[in-house]
Amino acid sequence: MVIVLICRFVKPTEEPKFLERYNEDQRKNVGIPDFICETLTKVNDSHDLPEFMRSLHLVRENCLNYVNLAYWTSAEAFAQRFTPKAPFDEETEVSPRLRVVLEIQQTTCDIKAAP
């Protein structure tokens, strides 16, 4: 199992439309054999947080920064599902998505691969 970390940079005025489209895409993933689950997060870059909690520089200025954690059986399965696909939605996002594959080494989470 891998986690594909996807950074998405959303136009502030288009956040409701972005979330609506995200939810539509989520429904399409249900039942895909190699898809396990995913979690959409919004980066909290508040200056009220200590600097050490804001040191993973994922934030871009003048947009809302989302990070999607997509759990798949393999990086190949993810790539096969999403290639070819536009790098971003120009209507709701300000720039192409950034992705990285994280290989799980250890976990205390109870996330199990779909049969």
Image (spheres, rainbow, N blue to C red):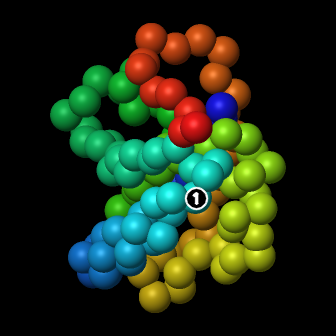
Badge 1 element = loop
Please state, as top left, top right, bottom left or bottom right, where the C terminus lies in the image: top right
Task: Bin the neighbour count of mark 1 within 10 Å (Cα to Cα): few under 14, some 14-19, many 20 and up.
Answer: few
Q: Nearer the viewer, residue 42 or 22?
A: 22
Q: Position of residue 52 (x, y in %)?
A: 40, 21
Question: Which residue is located at x 67 percent, y 79 percent?
Answer: 86
Measured as percent of width and height from the top left, residue 28 is found at: 48, 70
Quadrant of the image for the N terminus?
Answer: top right
Could you tell whether 72 is left or right of 10 in the image? Answer: right
**Closest to the observer, 20 or 30:** 30
Callout 1 amino acid: Ile
Locate residue 24, reporting x and y percent.
Answer: 38, 75
Q: Nearer the viewer, residue 80 or 14?
A: 80
Inspect this view and state whether residue 27 appears.
Answer: yes
Would you say residue 63 is visible in this rendering? Answer: no
Which is more toward the observer, 42 or 113? Answer: 113
Rendered location of residue 90, percent (x, y): 53, 85
| Residue 50 in which image quadrant | top left
Most extreme residue toward the left is: 48
- Depicted 18 relative to depicted 47: above or below: below
Residue at 50% x, 28% y is 112
In this view, the residue farthest toward the front is: 115
Residue pointed to by mark 1: 32
Name the residue at 77% across, 76% down.
Answer: 84
